Image (tube, rainbow, N blue to C red):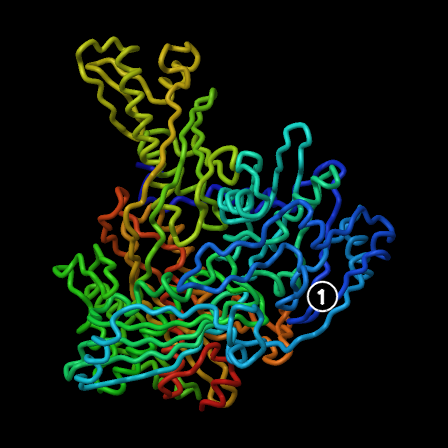
Amino acid sequence: MKFGIGQPVRRTEDIRFVTGHGRYTDDLHFPSEAHAAFVRSPYAHARIRSIDATQARSAPGVVAVLTYADVEAVGAGPMPCLAPIGGAKPSPKPLLAKDKVTFVGEAVAMVIAETYAQAVDAAELVAVEYETLEAAGTLQSAPKAAAIWECASGNLCFDWNAGDEKVCAEAFANASHRVSLEVVQNRVVANPLETRNATGIYDTKTDKYTLYTTSQGAGNVREMMAGLVLKTAPEKIRVVTPDVGGGFGMKGFLYPEQPLVLIAAKALGRPVRWTSDRTEAFLSDDHGRDMRTRGELALDSKGRILALRITGTANMGGYLSQYAPFIPTLAGGRIFGGIYRVPAVHARVRGFFSNSAPVDAYRGAGRPEAAYLMERLMDVAAAQTGIDRVELRRRNLPAPSELPYKNWSGVAFDSGDYPHLLEKAVKSADVAGFGVRREQSRARGKLRGLGLSYYVEITFSVGNEPAAVKFADDGTVEVRVGTQSNGQGHETAFAQLVGERLGVPFESVTVKQGDTDWVNGGGTAGSRSLNMAGGALMQASDEVIRKGKAAAAHLLQAGSEAVAFDVIDGVGRFSVGARSIGVAELALTLKRDRITGFENGLDSDATYTGKASTFPNGCHICEAEVDPETGKVDVVSYRVLDDFGRVINPMLVRGQVQGGVAQGLGQALLENCVYDPESGQLLTASFADYAMPRAEDVPDIEFAYEEVLCKTNELGAKGCGEAGTVGALPAVTSAVCDAIGVAHIDMPATPERVWRAL
């Protein structure tokens, strides 16, 4: 079917984006709106002795100044942590700092004025008296520093253990080969093109709040804010998220500024808006990664893995964000060891508070960390055992006949052909001819290296997700979902799904998202959107067909004859013998004639329940050149072969993989968020100090895929949004190590770091 499943359809939403007709939160303006600016702590760790806002309140244009006392007066709760893994110690962070601050950039007061410039100027007049305390700016300095939270001795937040320590120890004792490696997951800043923002409105007549904000799911923001922070009924809050300029995980959480603009709007009786500037974003957005891990691998004489042992530490920042403890533990921990046969695993990960911005999910959220450690260990094991890197992986990959294969944690890999993908990727990348290319680079004075990784990731395809299909009076179809596109192309993919299932024109399907008054769903995270919202749309479409058969039986006077529904030449029709009616015509007829029992026509909704996760997997092969005089790394070739199950739109998938690889390459070679270990000052608070990948840093990324349908959802799809990053981190680092002849180099492999290694 044209524009149906499997077709490379151009993104319909791109037309408005590239012509300047996108509608983002900051494009929305409301009568009598006021502007907010925040007073943020210049210290990483300090007690607040006093806050004097007298001058600020009398400054030109100032409407109000809010402090913790105002937050307390309305009974607002602290920022929530929804994943207290391993008995994580509490860190009750109020919306505005009460008696102490725990990181540079923490909001202390909120200034509201007629214009943004007036609010910024007045914020400088708020006098805050601080008593500075000993700070722990990094993961390494945290255990030795003064306690940030009273209940956390040595700043230990949690101590998570998984697996069988005794069985693992026995496997190591009997192993022919034992390899170990310490790796660093450098801290990164998400830096989406659109910074965070929020506009709050309060209606006194209905006692209802409306929040306009960029997010990865309006429903998640509403649920967290209503029950945990503002402590009001969810139906009293409407959250609207229009177009979103990138999220990468960072916009999947609740931030203090969102409930604060609602509190201010109610207090002032007028809309209050706030938009982060870029420095604020560096200081106050949730960061990603920031782990240090020691991995140990035990192998037998033939290179088969016997056991994996992991000992890690993770930085939580100044307080626990919503899912912070989940990321370095269960998020990636369930697939420690990757897709390989790893009979025994023991993992211990400890999380520490530090005087830095909170850390939470960033593209991949734990799975890149797990894949990076395992793939780097496989390279080191290959070097130590003398077994070729590809052969070592081949010996440890389960064959299709072994599926479903349960890993050490009980996760069942249901589908895939991992040895085949490895072989095909190696052949397509001409690994056998790499020696010739290496010599050609050497002749030009460059060192060339080849890196590879075989990754697996686990998507968050569980829980419930609603969706709705509605027919408009003009014959078009409106699809409502509770997930949120922030660059993935959902509007196109979901229209393809519904268009094919119902046999309605692709161009007649409009996807509506980002409004809790439409559908209150679970948002976009963990590569869940296609499986969950797509599953809900398929069920809603099936309900349309069920209703349609019943209605068509009445209109077509079927009597005892069964009504059939078929999509022929792209058109969906209900038929009885020679009589038939199209699905769109039937929907319009039912609404127009108000036929009893079908007053809503064929409009249908459904809630999909995800029963199991999916496991995207594939092989990344990277070639890099290093200038031995400067240490500069150039990625000169990059190939990916993926298994994402059913591919709805190859063009969208290619874009997602390329974007994910670019972010992985950025972390591997360039990006590094650095705090001073003693003062906790952020040293990389702008693009002058924090290196982002540019076009010249990213080569053409050759992408191919094979469809091995998963068995855990009707679509057979596995998800693709984060896979590029999961595979890229180890592949790029592997190429650099191979080029300069070292076992390992920590990310980011900057020119200085590479030069020193040489």
Q: Position of residue 466 (x, y in %)?
A: 40, 37
Q: Position of residue 46 (x, y in %)?
A: 68, 70
| Residue lying at the far left of the rendered structure | 401
Report the residue at 36% width, 36% height from top.
Answer: 607
Report the residue at 37% width, 15% height from top.
Answer: 598
Task: State which quarter of the image contains the N terminus.
Answer: top left
Report the residue at 30% width, 80% height from top.
Answer: 296
Amino acid carrying mark 1 in the image: Ile
Choose between 144 and 270: the one closer to the eye: 144
Against 556, is 54 above or below? below
Task: State which quarter of the image contains the C terminus.
Answer: bottom left
**Mark 1, residues whose alpha carbon is within 10 Å: few (<14), some, or many (≥20)?**
some
Against 667, is 572 above or below? above
> Relative to 385, is 180 on the left or the right?
right
Report the residue at 78% width, 58% height from top.
Answer: 123
How many marks overall? 1
> Relative to 87, is 321 on the left or the right?
right
Against 109, is 714 above or below? above
Q: Position of residue 39 (x, y in %)?
A: 73, 60
| Residue lying at the far front of the rendered structure | 151
Q: Position of residue 455 (x, y in %)?
A: 31, 66
Choose between 398 and 43: the one closer to the eye: 43
Reading the image, the residue beneath label 1 is 48
Choose between 431 and 67: the one closer to the eye: 67
> Relative to 402, is 137 on the left or the right?
right
Secondary structure category for the residue under label 1: strand
